Image (spheres, rainbow, N blue to C red):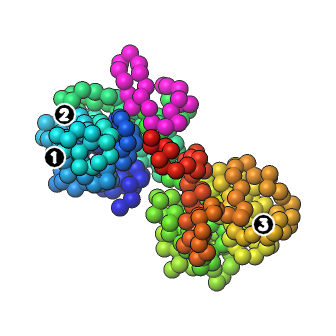
Amino acid sequence: MDHQIEDLLEHWLPLADDAWVLAVITQIQGSAYRKPGAMMLFHEFGQGVGMLSGGCLEADLRRHAQKAMQTKQVTCVTYDASDESDASYRLGCGGIVDIMLIPLLKENHDLGLIELVQAFRHGRSGFYQLPLVKAGTDARQYQAAFYPEALTPFPASDFVRTGVFTQEAGESLIIPLRPRFHLGIFGGGIDAKPIAAMADTLGWQVTVFDGRTAYARAADFPHAHIMKLTAGELTANHIAQLDCAVVMNHNLGLDAAALKVIQAHPLAYVALLGPAHRRDKVLGMAGLSTESFSGVFSAPAGLALGGELPSAVALSILAQCHGVLHGATLKHLDEIMR
């Protein structure tokens, strides 16, 4: 199962009347597998949905979750991988991870998770507020809340990433949430298959646009939404829902038409397959330049990772796109984790 919060909630919703516990990382010191705001759900029969570590903490967390269910109290757990006497020492990461476990109860409105489901289904972004409380706090009195972007009682600009908000009532963990990233692939040829498959594995929504009869067949893109439309048939709504796009029709005219439609919208990332001389021809036909796009325009598409097979090309494009969407810069991990 994927570990996107949307997927966790869709798994939980049909069984929402059962007993569940939400586990969330509230703070880390040093290195850790996942960061503050990462969530996991535990079912009363021991099933876990999601992950908070590489798999070493979940068994112990399940024990704490069962205790939280039985007592209907908030449980707080700290794992110190730098302490040889700690159960997490074998992880070898050297970091300290604080996790809060909160039972989902009718009295606390299931921690507002229904509101999160509705927000995701309607494509709305917002912020999830979880008060930071002491272990043993009565979970029936615990109140979490989801706020749409325009209705936050705190400066939304301060929480591009998960952080702690302090007010008179105490501290809260503020977790920014948004629907899954949406990738548009313009061109449903066989080499688009690994791009769609990898993007789906990343938890992204994928739509393939191709009006040609022999392309974008459902059997080739089992996890993507297929739109059998030409660029001229696309509406503003089709493009506005996208975060990023890869243009790969293998046809100069079709690629030019696609770029012309895409350019009118502020996508974060647009990639065009093919060498630089082909890029120039396509842009010329579309009456555009490399400066015409509000986000990153990558042509030739992707990072120079080596390899020439469709899977290698897909990796290079999605690696670059992922970095753009997450505001990352290309660095070695040892530069970040020192």
Relative to residue 182, is residue 133 drawn left or right? left
Real-space Cα separation, disc 2 to disc 3, in angstroms: 61 Å
Local SS, label 2: loop
Q: What element carries label 1?
A: helix
Left or right for 242, reference 51: right
Q: Mark 3 points at which residue?
A: 276
- The residue depicted at 27 percent of the width and 42 percent of the height is 81
The segment highlighted magenta reads: 153-173
The question of residue 257 being in magenta is answered with: no
Vertical comparison of 47 with 258: above or below: above
* Residue 77 seen in this snapshot: yes
Q: Which mark is residue 63?
A: 1
Q: Nearer the viewer, mark 1 or mark 3?
A: 3
Whether 257 is drawn above or below 239: the answer is below
Asked whether the viewer can see residue 24, the reply is no
Which residue is pictured at 48% across the width and 73% down the height?
222
Quick check: marks 2 and 1 in contact, CB under 8 Å?
A: no
Crowding at label 1, few (<14), some or many (≥20) Cα neighbours within 10 Å? Answer: few
Q: Camera-side residue: 98 or 66? A: 98
Nearer to us: label 2 or label 1: 1
Q: Tell me the amino acid under the disc marked 3.
A: Ala
Q: Residue at x 16, y 54 (%)?
A: 45
Label 1 vs 3, first from the N-terminus? 1
Residue behind mark 2:
73
Circle 2 residues within 10 Å: few <14, some 14–19, many ≥20: many
Tell me the amino acid under the disc marked 2: Gln
Along the polypeptide, which appears first: circle 2 or circle 3? 2
Does the stretch in magenta take in 168?
yes
**Earlier sequence position, callout 2 versus callout 1:** 1
